[in-house]
Amino acid sequence: MFSSRIRWDADPNAVSALAARKRAAGAALLDLTESNPTRVGLPFPAKAITAAFGAVGGMLRYDPVPAGLPAARDLVAARTGAAPDRICLTASTSEAYGFLFKLLADPGGKILVPRPSYPLFEYLAGLECLRVEAYPLHYEDGWYADRAALEAAIDASTRAIVVVNPNNPTGSYFSRGEAAWLDALAARHGVAVIADEVFAEYPIEVRDHAATAIRGREALTFSLGGLSKLACLPQMKLGWIVTSGPGDLVEAARGRLEWIADTYLSVGAPVQDALSALLDAGDAARGVLRVRTQTNLAALRAQFGSNSAATVLRVEGGWSAVIRLPRVRSEESWLLELLDRYDVLAQPGYFYDFETEAYLVVSLIPEPAVFAEGAGRIAAMVATSS
C-alpha cells in the first residue's frame, strides 16, 4: 500500500550496528562523524537568540508572502550579493531541492549529481519521481570534474546538473574554468545548474583559481544556502534559492517558483522576522568553526606524515576531510577495527559513493581535543596494520 519512490529499508550496516552495541555497553566513543554544529561546543549567544523571538511581533500576525518576507530577503541579498527579487526563501536547502526538481522536471526526468557526494540526492529526486545519474570527480593533487563523462551523461531527459561547491565530503571547489565550461555546457543543452553553496563560508585552503560562488551567465542557475551552515543553526529551518542567468529565463523561473512556494507556504514567519538577530548570532559561531576546521585539519595532517601509509587528501573548504588508506583490506574492515579496538567512529568512503576503496571521511568540526585524540588513534591503527 506504500509507494516505491525510494528504498524504505533502513537496515543498519555492520559499523553502525557495532557502534550501537558499544554505546549500549557504555563505551566512550570518539565520534569523528559529528556534523551537528549545535553539539560541538560553539559559543552561541543563547540570550540574544531567544530574545530575538521574544521581540518578534510578526509571529502573532499571518501575512504570507510566497517568496519570503521582503525584510528577510533583503538580509539574504546583503549576504549573497543578489537582488532581493531573485531570492526565494524555503524551509531548508532540502526543500529548495524539492522546489527546483518540481520546477524543472516531469516524472521520469534525470538529474546529474557529483560522485562522490553526500548521499541525499537519490532520496530527494526519488521523492519527486526523478532519476539521478552521477558524474565522477577525480583526484590528482586536487579534485576535478570529469568533463567528458558529465557531457556524455546529458540526454533529452536531463533537466539539471547539480554542483556542490565546495563538495561534501571532498572539500573541493569547481575551478573558474570548470564553472565557465559548465555554464556554457548547460546553456547549450538547455538544462539548469543547481549550485549547492551551503559550505561556501568555510574556506580552508582555497586554490587561487577556485570559483567560490557559481552564478549563471548563459545558463539558468540556482544557488542554494541556508542558516544550517551559514549561522550554524540547523534547527532554525531557513534556506534560500538565488536565481541567476539570462533575464527571460530568470523571470520565468521566478514566477513559477512563487507558484510552488505559494502552494506550500512552509517558511515560518518568526524565523524570518528574527533573521537579522540569527545571522548576527551565527557570525561568532561561524568564526570559531572556521578556525576549528583549520586547526583540526592541521592536527590530522600532523598524524600522517611522509612515513605514513595513509594520506590526507587536499581540502579547500567545508567541514570534512578524506583519508586515503592502504588498499590492503576493505573500508568496512578498517572501520570495524577502528571502532572495535580504538573506539573511534568515522565514515566509510562508500557512504559517499567513492568509486574505489579505501577511504575514511572524518568531520573537521568536533572539539579539538576529541578530534586530535581520534586522529592519533587512526594513525596508530594504520601504523600497526601496514
Image (cartoon, grey):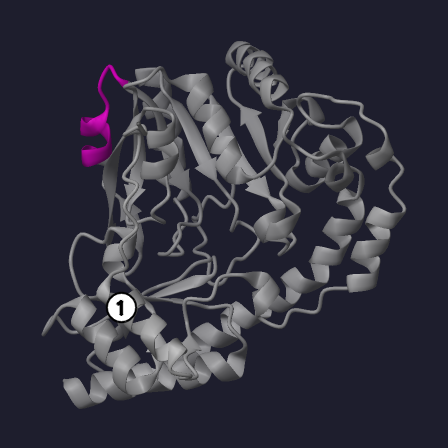
The residue located at (56%, 39%) in the rendering is 92
**Residue 196 in picture, x, y percent from top left:** 47, 40
List the residue tagged with mark 1: 15
**Residue 236 in picture, x, y percent from top left:** 66, 47
**Residue 122 in picture, x, y percent from top left:** 31, 37
Quadrant position of the N terminus in the picture: top left
* Magenta-tinted stretch: 148-157
**Residue 54 in picture, x, y percent from top left:** 87, 49
Magenta residue check for 108: no
Q: Is residue 50 above or below residue 360?
A: above
Residue type beneath disc 1 = Val
Q: Quadrant of residue 243?
A: top right
Q: Residues within 10 Å of mark 1 (few under 14, many from 20)?
A: many
The residue located at (44%, 31%) in the rendering is 194
**Residue extending farthest front:** 1
Q: Quadrant of residue 169?
A: bottom left
Q: Nearer the viewer, residue 369 or 250?
A: 369
Q: Quadrant of residue 107?
A: top left
Q: Main secondary structure of the magenta part?
A: helix
Q: Is residue 287 above or below residue 53?
A: below
Q: Secondary structure at mark 1?
A: helix
